[in-house]
Each structure stands twice: as C-alpha cells, then as structure tokens.
Image (spheres, rainbow, N blue to C red):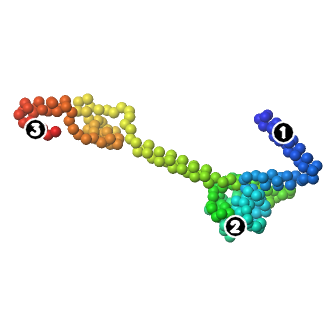
Amino acid sequence: MKYEGEKKKQLGKDRGKVIQKASNEGVSEAQIMRAVLESLSDPILVINKSQKIEWMNRAAYDLLLGISCPLKTMLCFECFHKRETPCDDNEEPCPMKRVSESGKPVTIVHEHYRADGEKRLYEITATPLWSQECTFQGIVESMRDITEHRRVEQEKERLITELQKSLSEIKVLKGLIPICAWCKKVRNDKGYWEKVENYIEKHSDARFTHGICNECLQKVEEKEHKTGIFQNNF
C-alpha cells in the first residue's frame, strides 16, 4: 500500500512537470490531454446526454466511420447500431441510461458495427461526465473488441459441456457388491437377487457373450459320457 501511494505521488509530480513544461512552451493542458487521447489505440468517445457524439479519438473514428469518411455529427445509435431510433434497454443495456441512473461508471457488452459493415462484440466502459455545477452532461466511452476472446470462451464452454456429457455416460462399478457365495447371484439396490451378468450390464456399458471354458467343457463331457447321452453342442 505504501509503495502504491508513493507511485501515485510520483506520477502526480511527473504529470505536473509535463504540464508545467508544456505551459512554458505555450501548450495548454487541454491540448496535452487531447494529444494523449488521440494516441490511444482503444476507441474513446464523448457522448452528450442527448446521445449525440461530441468527440471521438482517431481510433474510434477509423473503426466506426472509416479513414476516408468525412467528419459528421451522429447520434450514438446511428453510429454503433445503424438504426434510426434509440436502443431499447430491454434488448441491449444502454450505457447512457445505466450511467445517468446510477451516476457511476458501468461496464457492459455490446454488438457494434464497424465501418466495413462487420458486426463485432465490444466491452464498453462508460464513465459519467459532469459539469462544474455537478450536473450530468453525458458519458465518456472506451471500447475494447472482445469478439475473439468471446469466441474462445464459447468454444471452451462447448468442450467442457461435451466432456461433462461424456463423463456422465461412463458407468463405473465401485464399492461393495453383495454376491451369493453359492449361486453367484448379485443382490441389487432393491434387495432382489439377479444373475451377475444382468447386474453388470445394468450398471455398466459391458455386454456378455456366452461360451464355455475348457475346464467346464471337460466336466460336462465326463458327465455326459457317464450317462451315455453326450452331444457336443458347443
């Protein structure tokens, strides 16, 4: 905590030095801040409470309007959603509405059109913009393209769902299984005795095919020879 406090204090001093130097050179703080915002790779927009886009940095302009598009006044829903009427907050959360109601920053996810017509998914952070009299004037929006991130997340969720489904279909016998020491029948969960083959088939994906081992075959042959009615049915 102490380190963070010292770090913030140092950043404040550095900012003060930059502003002081710029002031000595005839550059205003507003010009510095504008230059900083223009240099950011994330799209930044200022939208008034009437939903009119008052300003956007170069990244936002290139993304939403295109490099060759002439500067023009637009409403946010015209620019982002290519529609003529304001967004329905029930369909998609409206940053302006949420911020104006809460007076606090909000982060939401929206689908926006790019200048080339492609629809992409963006994480939007909207921060309230206040006047000197502390009245709500609009919002400052920053945008981050999360289309690929969401696609990867959805693919991961799909694989997890498939894995869980596969695991649920795997039947594993475990624990103590009561079996008769004489007839080898198994007592099921309802207390009834049934053939071991039937029990295993019900509780696993195993299936039985019946044959006879050499030892049992020899016993059967000896018994049948004694009675004189031996027939090899195996």
Residue at image x 73%, y 52%? 41
Q: CA distance from mark 2 to mark 3?
A: 91 Å
Residue at image x 25%, y 41%? 209
Q: Position of residue 187 (x, y in %)?
A: 30, 36
Q: Is residue 51 visible?
A: no
Identify the element where label 2 is drawn: helix
Residue 82 left/right relative to 151: right
| Residue beneath disc 3 | 231
Residue at image x 61%, y 50%? 149
Residue type, numbered disc 3 = Gln
| Residue beneath disc 1 | 10
Above/below status of 144 relative to 200:
below
Q: Position of residue 146 (x, y in %)?
A: 64, 52
| Residue beneath disc 2 | 78
Residue 78 left/right relative to 34: left
Q: Residues within 10 Å of mark 1 (few under 14, many from 20)?
A: few
Residue type, numbered disc 2 = Glu
